[in-house]
Image (cartoon, rainbow, N blue to C red):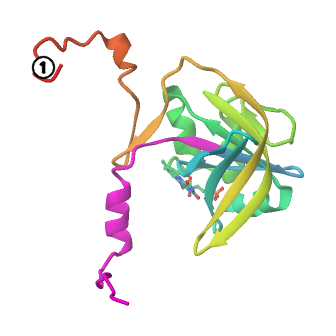
Amino acid sequence: MKKFLRNTNIDADRFRNGMAQLTGAVNIIATRNGEVRSGLTASAVCSFSAEPPRLLACVNFSGNSFQHIAESRCMSVNVLAQSQEHLAKRFADMLGGKHEDRFNYGKWTEMVTGAPVLEEALAGFDCTVEEMLVAHTHAVIIGEVKDVIVNSGLKPLLYSNRAFTTTMGHYDDLHLDYSMSPWY
Ligand SMILES: Cc1cc2nc3c(=O)[nH]c(=O)nc-3n(C[C@H](O)[C@H](O)[C@H](O)COP(=O)(O)O)c2cc1C
């Protein structure tokens, strides 16, 4: 069979430069393992299925939180608002400080599974761990969503081109004047 693949030299930096163009929502994944709370900032999160309700998160297993999620079999996924950039930095270890102090910031509660849920998050998904696929440096975790809190109406926190940002708002609310646009 004819081969169409040619040798390429994709290294991690070229991959990261490409991925930096993928704008994403910023979340905190959190768990409780006995008395220990652990959590990390994560953008590798997405919906998996609505029926049944499942989401997907990718977590580096060399960090602190993966082991706790694997042992407790529960996690929350908290979608951050723009005003929670300081929490994103705290849970990504960008501000220094001890790992166990991360939960001293923000208002945390518990719902069904015992995982900490951020009360003021745009949305908080309380999950048990259904499946875990470990490959290379990361684990793909499928969360079985047991409960959800929603605080809609806030601007989302996004990560784009290696910086935190947010949206302009909905086009309909911006009252843009398209009258001069040739294609409108
Ligand atoms: C915007 C942003 C997105 C991130 N996304 C992820 C991610 O999806 N998965 C991951 O494992 N780490 C991600 N990280 C890195 C972790 O937040 C960071 O390494 C954290 O300190 C790990 O905490 P832990 O030691 O408790 O696991 C991200 C960091 C930033 C700033």
Residue at (51, 26) in percent of width and height:
83
Residue at (33, 50) in percent of width and height:
21
User: Quarter-wise, where is residue 79 in the image?
Assistant: top right
The extreme bottom residue here reads 1
Q: Residue 9 in the image: state x and y as whole percent.
A: 30, 80
In the rendered view, would you say 169 is above or below 82?
A: above
User: Quarter-wise, where is residue 117 in the image?
Assistant: top right
User: Is residue 8 one of those drawn in magenta?
Assistant: yes
Residue at (64, 21) in percent of width and height:
151
Q: Residue 44 in the image: state x and y as whole percent.
A: 54, 52
SS of the residue under disc 1: loop
Q: Which residue is mark 1?
A: 181
Residue 146 lies left or right of residue 1; in this view the side is right
User: Is residue 94 one of those drawn in magenta?
Assistant: no
Residue 124 lies left or right of residue 13; in this view the side is right
- Could you tell me which quadrant the N terminus lies in? bottom left
Disc 1 crowd, CA 10 A, few/some/many (<14, 14-19, 20+): few
In the rendered view, would you say 79 is above or below 140?
A: above
Judging depth in this view, the residue of 102 and 120 nearest the camera is: 120
In the rendered view, would you say 29 is above or below 135?
A: above
- Magenta residues? 1-28
Judging depth in this view, the residue of 181 and 88 nearest the camera is: 181
User: Quarter-wise, where is residue 174 in the image?
Assistant: top left
Residue at (57, 44) in percent of width and height:
90
At label 1, the amino acid type is Ser
